[in-house]
Amino acid sequence: MGTFIYPLLSLVNLHMLLVLCFVVTTEALVKNVSALYVFGDSTVDPGNNNYINTFFTSNFPPYGIDMPNHVPTGRFTNGKLGTDFLASYVGLKELLPPYLDPKLSDKELITGVSFASAGSGFDPLTPTFSNVIPISKQLEYFKECKKKLEGLLGRERTENHMRNALIFISAGTNDFVVNYFSVPIRRKSYTLFTYQQFLLQHVKELIQNLWAEGARKIAVAGLPPMGCLPITITAISNNSILERGCVDKFSKVARDYNLMLQHELFFMQQNFSSYAKAKISYIDIYGPLANMIEGHQNLGFDEVDIGCCGSGFLEAGFMCNKISYVCPDPSKYVFWDSIHPSERAYHNILLAARPTIDALVNG
């Protein structure tokens, strides 16, 4: 009997140790992140576009079909965004609200909001196409938010709050897909390389402005494999019905941009570290999405080149609506509509980013 009990007790003790380690790790994350503040486009907009005069919204079915009570919120997916999973992972809350929500509480403001706007980009021209919120205006909202926090917490506590807040930036896809490759305006003045440099200059200016406001933990997402977006395949493929492979010409643009972005962030990190404790991290979006597409069968995905909503070839925004066909199981699709990942894909991206997030918030 004793020879059976002792190994059993050892297993119980090991289990308790693992649980304790998990709790300690989670508490460490909670302790080191005071809030989450987000800037960018539809990949991180939880519904700010609901409150502005734009056609580019998603606060109607079937968007949000997998949200609590199946209520569409303005998120361009079937459920949660990656930043919702991020807010939960660092122990703040389950859903990150939009800053423009008139019902936003003081508590929500303190623990974090998103200033992002679907259709926006780093290029100031990009948001003008759909009348959405430019990154510059998102920064103004952040400064306004900080003033409100000073009224709630006091100036000294707000400065400390900002030092421990996590800043997340995700934009750039619209600058290429909606702007540079679709409208000739920028192509008349910029080569592809100089346009990439132009965008990176705006990224750096945003980071510098955030740093000046007290941000010290900043994460910047790279671009996805743009040639694998269903809408890109539909637009470029010789036979959009039968030939649904990724268009590497566009994915290469993303790879090149991501490499340049990583170099710029590295140099900014070195410069900031020389006179202030600050961390800037690159978040890889391309790799996790490419892995889901290439290894979809091993990861439980059935469809990788069409969206779950409608035909999956073109539908996004108002074209994905209450009369659209919806696939039986969105979790089997990498993309929810022709542009945006599904909730499950967003969750997988967060899982892949966890080591980087851990190093950023605990470093």
Image (tube, rainbow, N blue to C red):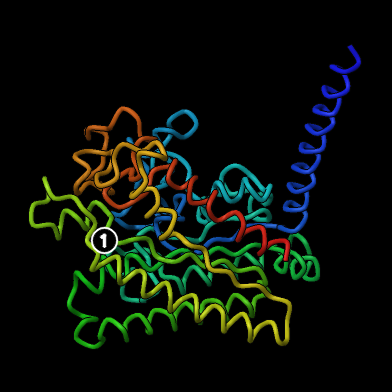
| Image coords of residue 29 (percent x, y) | 72, 53
**In this image, 281 relative to 43: left or right?**
right
Q: List the single residue furthest toward the front.
A: 3
Numbered marks: total: 1
Could you say which is closer to the camera, residue 146 or residue 9?
Answer: 9
Quarter the C terminus occupies = bottom right
Q: Which of the 4 quarters of the picture holds residue 141? A: bottom right
Could you say which is closer to the camera, residue 162 or residue 11?
Answer: 11
Q: Residues within 10 Å of mark 1 (few under 14, many from 20)?
A: many
Which residue is painted at 26% across and 61% down in the image? 227
User: As displayed, is residue 188 above or below residue 145?
Assistant: below
| Image coords of residue 155 (percent x, y) | 77, 70
Q: List the single residue furthest toward the left.
A: 238
Which residue is painted at 51% across and 61% down in the image? 115
| Image coords of residue 343 (percent x, y) | 43, 42
**In this image, 47 relative to 279: left or right?**
left
**In this image, 5 relative to 298: left or right?**
right
Q: Which of the 4 quarters of the picture holds residue 124? A: bottom left
Residue that mark 1 sits on = 227
| Image coords of residue 31 (percent x, y) | 78, 54
Label 1 residue SS = helix
Which residue is painted at 19% across and 49% down in the image? 314
Which residue is painted at 47% across and 71% down in the image? 137
User: As displayed, is residue 241 above or below residue 231?
Assistant: above
Q: List the single residue furthest toward the right.
A: 2
Could you say which is closer to the camera, residue 10 or residue 353?
Answer: 10
User: As displayed, is residue 149 above or below residue 68?
Assistant: below
Q: Amino acid at mark 1?
A: Gly
Quarter the N terminus occupies = top right
**In this image, 357 relative to 258: left or right?**
right
